[in-house]
Image (cartoon, grey):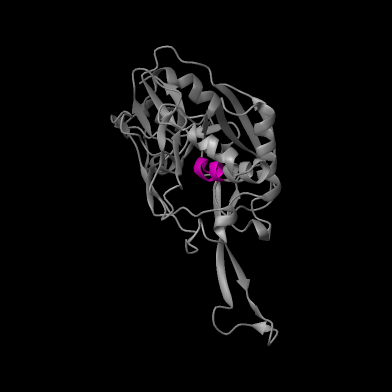
C-alpha cells in the first residue's frame, strides 16, 4: 500500500476532534458528491474482510503520536514525586522522533523515565481544548430571544498548536484522486456545525512512510478501531463509546426509501488510539467495517485500525 501524510492547518474551531472514522465518513460523502453512488458502492465492496483499501489514522499534532497504553510503571526511579505522577497522567502524546527510536525496546518504564527527565521534552497533553459556546435563537415574530429554547450552548474544540498530521495507507485511489477528495472535505469543513464555519482547514498531502522495524512483535494503534474476530487479543487498551451521526444528505433527510429521518447511529464501543497489542507478524491494518450500526442495514461504521510496529 502507498503511504501518505496529510498535514492539516485548522482555520477555525472544530465541532469534534479529528478521528479516523469521522474523516472516513467525510471522504465517502465526497466520493458520492463528486462521482456518484455507484463509485461509493464499489469502494465499500472492496472492504471484503480480507482487504482494506484505505487505512486512516486519527489526527495528531504534527511531530507527535499517541502515548502507548502499557502496564503502569512500578519503577521507583522513574516516578520520584507526586508532581511526577501527575505529569505522567496528563501526557497523551509522545514525540514522533523519540517514539520511533524507543520503539525497538518499548516499555512504560522507558517512557516514564524519559518523561520525568527534565532534559527531554518528549511529551504533550491532550491537544484538543474543549470550549462551550453560547447561542441565541431569535423569534422572527417578536424579534427577540425565544422564551423557551432560545438560549443554548454547544461544544467547540480548539487545537493546542498549529498543525495536525493524519497518516494514510491506500491502494484504491491515486494520489491525485485522494487529494481531490480531501480538497472537497476541506472546502466543506470537518465535523458538526460546518454551516456555522466550524471545521475549516487547509492541507498538504505528501508521501510518507514509517520506517519498518525488524523483529516487531506488537503494534500501537494510531486510530480508534473495532477489532475483527481474527485480530490479536493480548494487549493493553482503553475503550470509548462512539455516538456516531450520519452526514451529508442523511444528516437532514431519510437514509433510504421508506425510512424515517434518523441521523443517529447506535452507540458503538471502540478501542482508543494508543492501544497496544502483541502480534508476531504485524499486518497492514486491523479492525473491520462494523455492520448493524443503524436501522438502514447498508450503513457501516469505519472501525479500521492503523498500526505502528513496535518491539516489546
Q: Quadrant of the N terminus?
A: top right
- State left or right for residue 190 relative to residue 81: right
> Along the line of sight, which residue is nearer the eye, 247 or 268?
247
Q: Is residue 134 visible?
A: yes
Lateral position of residue 11 relative to residue 306, left or right: right
The answer to whether residue 78 is visible is no
Q: Nearer the viewer, residue 290 or 280?
A: 290
Q: Magenta stretch: dominant SS?
A: helix
Residue 278 is left or right of residue 135, and the answer is left
Q: How many marks?
A: 0
Q: Which residues are magenta?
A: 18-25
- Residue 52 placement (x, y as % from top left): 47, 29
Q: Residue furthest top?
A: 214
Extreme residue toward the front, this view: 257
157 w.r.t. 301: above or below: below
User: Residue 58 in magenta?
Assistant: no
For this view, does 99 lie left or right of residue 89? right
The quadrant where residue 310 appears: top left
- Residue 163's spot in the image, x, y percent? 65, 39
Residue at x-position 36% and y-position 25%: 107
Relative image position of residue 11 (x, y in whole percent) = 70, 48
* On screen, residue 40 above or below 207: below
Rendered position, 2 above or below 189: above
- Check the picture and name the quadrant holding the C terminus: top left
Quadrant assignment, res 253: bottom right
Residue placed most toward the observer, 110 or 143: 143
Task: Estimate the x, y position of residue 66 in percent, counting from the top left.
Answer: 48, 35
Q: Spot the residue most to the bottom.
A: 142
Amino acid at each position: 500500500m502507498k503511504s501518505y501524510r496529510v498535514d492539516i492547518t485548522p482555520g477555525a474551531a472544530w465541532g469534534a476532534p479529528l478521528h479516523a472514522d469521522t474523516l472516513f465518513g467525510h471522504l465517502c460523502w465526497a466520493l458520492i458528491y463528486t462521482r456518484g453512488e455507484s463509485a461509493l458502492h464499489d469502494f465499500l465492496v472492496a472492504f471484503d474482510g480480507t482487504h482494506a483499501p484505505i487505512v486512516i489514522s486519527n489526527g495528531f499534532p504534527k511531530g507527535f503520536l499517541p502515548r502507548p497504553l502499557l502496564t503502569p510503571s512500578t519503577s521507583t526511579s522513574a516516578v520520584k514525586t507526586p508532581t511526577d505522577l501527575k505529569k505522567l497522567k496528563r501526557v497523551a502524546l509522545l514525540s514522533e522522533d523519540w517514539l520511533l527510536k524507543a520503539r525497538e525496546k518499548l516499555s512504560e518504564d522507558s517512557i516514564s523515565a524519559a518523561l520525568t527527565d527534565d532534559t527531554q521534552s518528549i511529551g504533550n497533553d491532550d491537544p484538543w481544548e474543549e470550549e462551550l459556546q453560547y447561542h441565541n435563537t431569535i423569534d422572527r415574530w417578536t424579534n427577540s430571544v425565544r422564551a423557551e429554547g432560545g438560549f443554548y450552548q454547544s461544544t467547540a474544540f480548539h487545537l493546542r498548536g498549529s498543525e495536525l498530521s493524519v497518516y494514510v495507507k491506500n491502494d484504491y485511489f491515486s494520489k491525485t484522486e485522494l487529494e481531490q477528495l480531501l480538497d472537497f472535505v476541506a472546502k466543506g469543513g470537518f465535523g458538526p456545525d460546518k454551516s456555522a464555519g466550524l471545521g475549516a482547514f487547509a492541507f498538504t498531502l505528501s508521501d510518507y512512510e514509517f520506517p519498518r522495524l525488524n523483529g516487531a512483535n506488537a503494534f500501537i494503534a494510531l486510530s480508534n478501531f473495532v477489532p475483527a474476530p481474527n485480530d490479536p487479543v493480548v494487549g493493553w487498551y482503553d475503550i470509548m463509546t462512539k455516538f456516531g451521526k450520519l452526514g451529508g444528505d442523511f444528516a437532514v433527510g431519510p437514509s433510504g426509501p421508506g425510512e424515517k429521518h434518523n441521523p443517529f447511529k447506535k452507540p458503538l464501543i471502540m478501542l482508543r488510539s494508543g492501544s497496544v497489542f502483541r502480534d508476531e507478524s504485524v499486518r497492514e491494518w486491523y479492525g473491520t467495517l462494523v455492520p448493524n450500526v443503524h436501522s438502514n442495514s447498508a450503513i457501516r461504521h469505519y472501525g479500521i485500525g492503523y498500526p505502528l510496529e513496535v518491539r516489546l
